[in-house]
């Protein structure tokens, strides 16, 4: 991995941490404000309950005055009744007394109702008071916590900003500008490549791009999301692992009439895929650039089967799964299609994984799927 890429990874980590801390610092006052809002609600509720209690008490006093007044009237009527001259006058006073007594009874009922209500109101007030007390204590604690957390965050933020500046100094200016532009729009500016994919945008890379990232000799950006790409072989192994644990890689048949191989070096073409085939007592060889899928040179034909005709090509090559008809390959012209190229790349990854896991588990068989010339 290029040291610049490593610096960018650390830079991305610092940027992420700085954003998290800034968000947290911004979030703390909001939390305190939310509790303060709740506290204000409880206060208003308490005030309403207290006002209602006072109003009820006033109503009750008014009713009591009414009763006192009515009792005064009754007593006055009784006094008058002693002095009446006629039966009609007496009846009229008696009627007044009965009316006042009915009024008293009705008012007493209203007072009783208010007394029953008062119990419920009292409970409301007490509950609101208790809640207010608890919330007031909570808000003090929250405020203290928020102050402490903010101070800690600010300190960490200063540390991370220092680290960020240090990392920025270790990245070339153009690359840094690119990283920051993409970060600004996409949240991150660098992405890992796994299993031929940009892990950030999940788009498959072209074989050439993938290879450039793998070799790690130059900085490469994702065609789709513009993030700077990097490759971590350890993660690539993990990414491949579950698939290969589920089903072992299918092994190509040794006597197949067509065989595909990967060679790291071929003449001056570099990495290639070879297709060797037997047909009508003759062996043919096609060579494809592994990154572009382009046919390299002419199709070569020799007498006999390919194992005897092209032993130098088979030795040290990695045998791959692949089978296309002669007619298919004629239709390809000078470039194999992406689907074929991808399937060879995928199988090569699987073969490499198989080789590495065999080496690491020290299996009894040295079964590295490179081939020796069979003679
Ligand atoms: Zn991408």
Image (cartoon, helix red, strand yellow):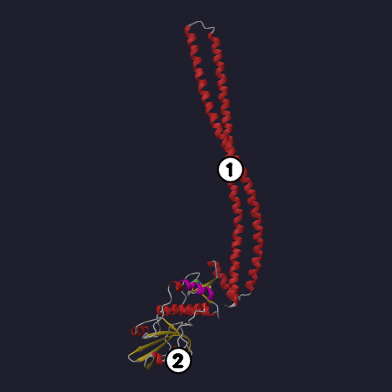
Name the residue located 65 percent from the left edge and 63 percent from the top edge. 156
Q: Mark 2: which secondary structure? A: helix
Q: Quadrant of the C terminus?
A: bottom left
**Residue 234 lies within the magenta run:** yes
Q: Quadrant of the N terminus?
A: bottom right
Tally the marks.
2
Residue closer to the observer: 242 or 155: 242
Q: Along the horizontal axis of the image, is 166 left or right of 62?
A: right
Q: Earlier in the sequence, mark 2 or mark 1?
A: 1
Q: Position of residue 190 (x, y in %)?
A: 55, 71
Label 1 crowding class (10 Å Cα cut-off): few <14, some 14-19, many 20+?
many
Where are the magenta residues, as a range?
231-242
Q: Mark 1: which secondary structure? A: helix
Can residue 229 be seen in this snapshot? no
Q: Quadrant of residue 41?
A: top right
Q: Position of residue 5 (x, y in %)?
A: 58, 75
Can residue 57 be seen in this snapshot? yes
Q: Along the horizontal axis of the image, is 342 left or right of 190?
A: left
Q: Quadrant of residue 26?
A: bottom right
Alpha carbon of mark 2 to alpha carbon of mark 1: how far?
88 Å
Label 2 crowding class (10 Å Cα cut-off): few <14, some 14-19, many 20+?
few
Residue closer to the observer: 73 or 264: 264
**Residue 201 lies within the magenta run:** no
Residue 42: numbered disc:
1
Q: Position of residue 296 (x, y in %)?
A: 43, 88
Q: Position of residue 178 (x, y in %)?
A: 56, 73
| Tag 2 residue | 312
Residue 314: numbered disc:
none
């Amino acid at each position: 991995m290029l040291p610049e890429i490593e610096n960018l990874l650390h830079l991305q980590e610092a940027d992420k941490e700085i954003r998290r801390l800034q968000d947290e610092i911004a979030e703390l006052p909001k939390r305190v404000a939310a509790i303060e809002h709740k506290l204000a609600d409880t206060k208003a509720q308490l005030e309403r309950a207290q006002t209602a209690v006072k109003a009820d008490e006033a109503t009750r006093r008014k009713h009591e005055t009414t009763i006192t007044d009515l009792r005064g009237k009754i007593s006055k009527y009784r006094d008058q009744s002693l002095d009446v001259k006629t039966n009609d006058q007496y009846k009229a006073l008696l009627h007044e007394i009965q009316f006042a007594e009915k009024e008293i009874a009705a008012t007493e009922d209203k007072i009783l109702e208010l007394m029953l209500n008062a119990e419920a109101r009292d409970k409301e007030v007490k509950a609101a008071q208790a809640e207010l007390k608890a919330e007031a204590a909570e808000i003090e604690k929250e405020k203290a916590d928020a102050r402490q957390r903010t101070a800690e965050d600010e300190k960490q933020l200063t540390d991370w900003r220092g680290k960020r500046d240090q990392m920025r100094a270790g990245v070339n200016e153009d690359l840094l500008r690119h990283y920051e532009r993409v970060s600004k729009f996409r949240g991150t500016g660098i992405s890992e490549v796994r299993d031929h994919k940009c892990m950030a945008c999940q788009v498959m890379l072209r074989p050439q791009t993938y290879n450039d990232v793998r070799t790690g000799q130059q900085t490469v950006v994702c065609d789709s999301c513009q993030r700077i790409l990097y490759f971590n072989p350890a993660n690539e192994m993990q990414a491949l692992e579950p698939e290969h644990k589920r089903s072992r890689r299918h092994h190509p048949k040794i006597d197949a009439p067509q065989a595909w191989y990967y060679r790291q070096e071929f003449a001056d073409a570099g990495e290639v895929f070879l297709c060797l085939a037997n047909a009508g007592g003759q062996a043919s060889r096609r060579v494809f650039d592994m990154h572009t899928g382009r046919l390299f040179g002419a199709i070569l034909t020799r007498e006999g089967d390919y194992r005897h005709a092209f032993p130098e090509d088979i030795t040290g090559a990695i045998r791959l799964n692949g089978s296309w008809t002669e007619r298919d390959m004629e239709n390809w012209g000078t470039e194999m299609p992406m689907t074929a190229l991808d399937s060879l790349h995928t199988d090569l990854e699987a073969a490499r994984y198989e080789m590495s896991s065999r080496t690491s588990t020290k299996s009894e068989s040295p079964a590295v799927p490179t081939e020796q010339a069979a003679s």
